[in-house]
Amino acid sequence: MALARVYIRRKEPGKGWRYKAVPKGGGRRPALEPGAKFHVRYPDASGKFVWSQAYDTLEEAQREAAGLELNAKAVGMGLTLEEFKDRQNANRVPLKKAVEHFLSEAKKTKKRKTVVGYELNLQQFEESVGSKVKFLDEVGKPQLQAFRDYLAGKGYEARTLHNRMMTVLSLLKANRIKTDFSLSSDLPEFEEEPAVPYEPAELKKLFAAMKPEEVIRYKFFLGTACRDKEVTYASWQDIDFARGIYHIRRKPDVGFTPKKHESRDVKMPTELVEMLKQRRKKAPHQRWIFVNQEGRPDNHFLRKFKRNLSNRLRTNPEL
């Protein structure tokens, strides 16, 4: 069945008023002379082609053509327009459902903090597109650019824009939706600040100002180069004193999984091994090496380190 088509009706020299089809897609916009109008040619219920009313703009005529085209397809299949739309959308994935499934899958393999971040990022993405996007396959470069501008309007920095956009791109990738949105050219650049290690003399002064509990805590970080959670859930059963090795392994009962789900062994310096041996004699907990006042695995080590360092700097400017 032929589809609805937009025409422009304009006066041509020596020929009078004529209809000319408007190119579909990204063709050149037709020139408008005084009195030129847009019309839609479409088949009626009997299959006979008829002309629509006149429209002043191409956009109005295109919207009318799209509606008439859907209606013609529905009639050809013996369906109502709503029945046809339901059938047409039967294999499409609603954006809301795609987000729910993505988060559900993330909860199986990602840490709670990561999932919470995903939830926030995708909630903001849904807010940015509003009711304009119902299905996932409607998400393209314009929608991603709109999300970028939405985040920038809220005052987020370039690194945050990058991280939140990565969540949305992961959602699209999981559903095999491709776009030509570029992280390098469609997002502002940001500089990675390299970590600057403390000099031996600086570490000596810093440890001298710490309490004994702080000393062994941060000596453990320094001697193992472990991540925050790997220290939080370090247990005595993980320490091989004979070989001086810390076994980093998952602990499902407390929800701890090493990064990339890979267990590994870390060789510890002799000084740290000796410190742990002494601590083991009067261990603050039967299982965990470092615990808080409630007897649970201690955490927020980086925040505590910064706070302690700030206090030391105020009370001892020589540090």
Image (cartoon, grey):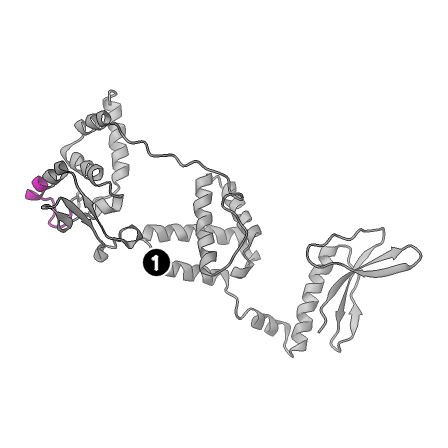
Question: Residue 80, position in %: x, y?
Answer: 63, 75
Q: Is residue 226 magenta?
A: no
Task: Name which residue lies at 85% across and 56% down.
Answer: 10
Span colored in magenta:
277-288
Count numbered badges in the picture: 1
Q: Residue at x 21, y 57 (%)?
A: 253
Q: Is residue 123 visible?
A: no
Given the current orientation, which residue lies at the most extreme top position?
A: 318
Quadrant (top left, top right, bottom left, bottom right) of the C terminus? top left
| Image quarter in which the N terminus is found | bottom right
* 20 versus 301 height, above or below: below
Q: Residue at x 83, y 55 (%)?
A: 36
| In the depicted structure, whether residue 286 falls above or below residue 86 | above
Q: Indicate the secondary structure of the residue bearing disc 1.
A: helix
- According to the image, label 1 marks what residue? 107
**The magenta stretch spans residue 284:** yes
Instruction: Tell me the crowding category of disc 1: few under 14, some 14 to 19, or many 20 or more residues within 10 angstroms, Cα based.
Output: few
Residue 89, given in percent of the width and then of the height, sits at 55, 68
Residue visible at 55% across and 54% down? Answer: 140
Q: Nearer the viewer, residue 4 or 312?
A: 4
Q: Quadrant of residue 293?
A: top left
| Residue extending farthest left | 281
The answer to whether any part of residue 259 appears in the image is yes
25 to 1, vertically: above or below: above
Q: Is residue 87 left or right of residue 29?
A: left
Residue 304 at what x, y percent from top left? Answer: 25, 36
Q: Nearer the viewer, residue 204 or 91?
A: 204
- Given the image, on which type of amino acid does mark 1 rest? Lys
